[in-house]
Amino acid sequence: MTKLESRILRLMTAMPMWLLMGLGPGVLAAFAVIILYTAGGDAGTDRYRMGPRLEPATPPPPSILLLKAAQSTQIFQTPPAGEVTLHLPHGPGNPRNCMGAFVTLAGGRVLLAYQHHTGEDWDDMSPAVVTGRISEDGGRTWAAQDRLLVANDAACNVGGPSLLRLDDGRIGLWYHRMQSLADCRLWMRTSADEGESWGEPVLCMPAPGYFVIANQRAVRLAGGRLMVPAAYHRTRLDDLSDPAAFDLRGIWMFFLSDDAGQTWREAADWWTLPRASVSGAHEPGVVELADGSIWSWARTSTGRQWQMRSEDGGERWSLPAPTHLRSPISPMAVATLPTGDLLAVWNDRDRRWGLPLPDLASRRTPLTCALSSDGARTWHSAQLIESDVTRAYSYPAIHVVGDAVLLAYGCSEDPSGLPEMCVRRVPIGWFYGRAE
C-alpha cells in the first residue's frame, strides 16, 4: 500500500456514512478499487470473497465495501494448532534449512527430508545437500542428528525433496540438481531398505532447461502413474550473469511415469497464465480427487493461487483460472485427509483475519488453512496456524500420521520465511474446530 492509498483509506474510515454516500458513484467506485487492491488481490480480477466458507460471490456495491472498510476489525480467535515438535534454526556453516518432505517408514517411524544449506550464503543457488531426520513416535519427538540422504554433486546445490511410497513398497526420493540458471532438473532415487540406502539417480526431465519443483510435489495416482508438476523458466540471453537472462514467468508443465519411475515423459499440455503477469505460474502442485480427476494449483503474482483440472490422468488440462484463495507469491500445499476432505495450507493475506498485515505485499504471512469437501471448488473451516505477522512462513508440506497431521514449513523473521524450518504436529480434529 502506497502512502497515498493509506491516507485515502484512513480518510474514508473517518468519514460518516451519510457523507460518503454524498460523494457520488464515480468517487465511490474509485475508493472501492483502492480497497480491493489494498486487500491483497488483483483489483481487475477480484471475483471472490473470503467469507466463512470462502465461497465465490458477486462483488458488493461500493457503498457496502465502504461500510465494511469503516467497521473496526477484530483478530480472528482460534485455539492453538497443535505444537511445534522440531525447530531447525540456521547457524554458522548452516545458513538455511527449508523445503521439507515426509514419508512413513516401517513400524510407524517417520522420515523428514529437507534442504540443508552449507557454507555462509543462503541464496537459492548457494551450496546445499538433502538431509533426513527420523521420528520414532509419529512426529512427537525427533532424533537429535541428521543423516545425509543426497550429497551435493551439482555445481550449485541439490534440494527441494519429495518422498513417496511406491506401489512395490520401495520409497521414492525426488530432488533437484541445480547446475546454473539454465540447468535445473529433477532426479529420482529409490530405496528398498526403508531409506537406509538409495539407488542410482534417474533423470525425470528429458529435455534440458531450468525447471522449478517445490518440495513434496511428487504424487502417485490410483492407477499407479507417477506425476511431477514443474514450472519451466526460459533463458533469454547467452550471458547468464546478466539479470535479464532469466525469465521469471513460469510455464506450467507436468512429467509422467508409467513404469514406477524408470522412464519419464512430458505430458501433452503445458500452460501459462492467460493474462499478463510478472510471475506466470510458479511451483505448481497436484492432488488426485475422489472422482479420479486431478486438480493443480500454482502461486502467482496476481494476489491469488491459480488452478487447472485434468480428466485424463494429467495429459491435458483446462484453461488456468484464479482460485478463491488469496495469496502473495508463495507456494501452497494441499493433501487429502482420511475424512476425504482436502486440506490446504497457505499464506492467506485476506484482511478478514483482522491482523495488522505488513505493507510488504510479498511477505509470506500469516500461515492459514482451510478444507474443501467438493474437490477444491469451495473452501470452508478456515483457521490460523501461525498469526505472528512479524515472522514469515513458507514451503509447507503436509503428511498424515494416524489421527494427526505433520506440517513442515519455513518460519523466520525474513519476509521469505526461508532461513529456518519447523515441524508442527496438529490433531486432525483441530482442522474441524474440535479442541483435542
Image (spheres, grey):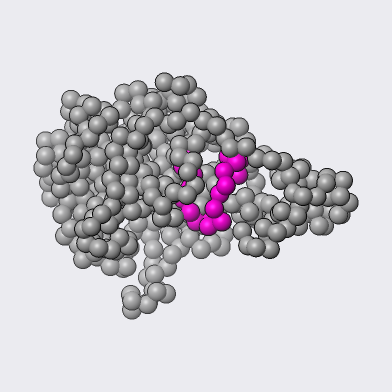
Residue 325 x, y percent position in the rendering: 54, 43
Position of 368 with respect to 259 (left or right) is: right
Which image quadrant for residue 5?
Answer: bottom right
Asked whether, in this view, residue 36 is left or right of residue 159, the answer is right
Q: Residue at x 17, y 51 (%)?
A: 150
Residue 353 lies within the magenta run = yes
Q: Magenta residues?
A: 350-368
Measured as percent of width and height from the top left, residue 332 is found at 43, 45
Report the front residue among 309 and 117: 117
**How far from the left and from the top, in percent, is residue 88?**
28, 45
Relative to 68, say whether 238 is above or below: below
Camera-side residue: 9 or 433? Answer: 9
Indicate left or right for 2 with 292 as reference: right
Q: Nearer the viewer, residue 419 or 111?
A: 419
Q: Vertically, is 136 above or below 389? A: above
Q: Which part of the image, by quadrant, shows the C terminus? A: top left
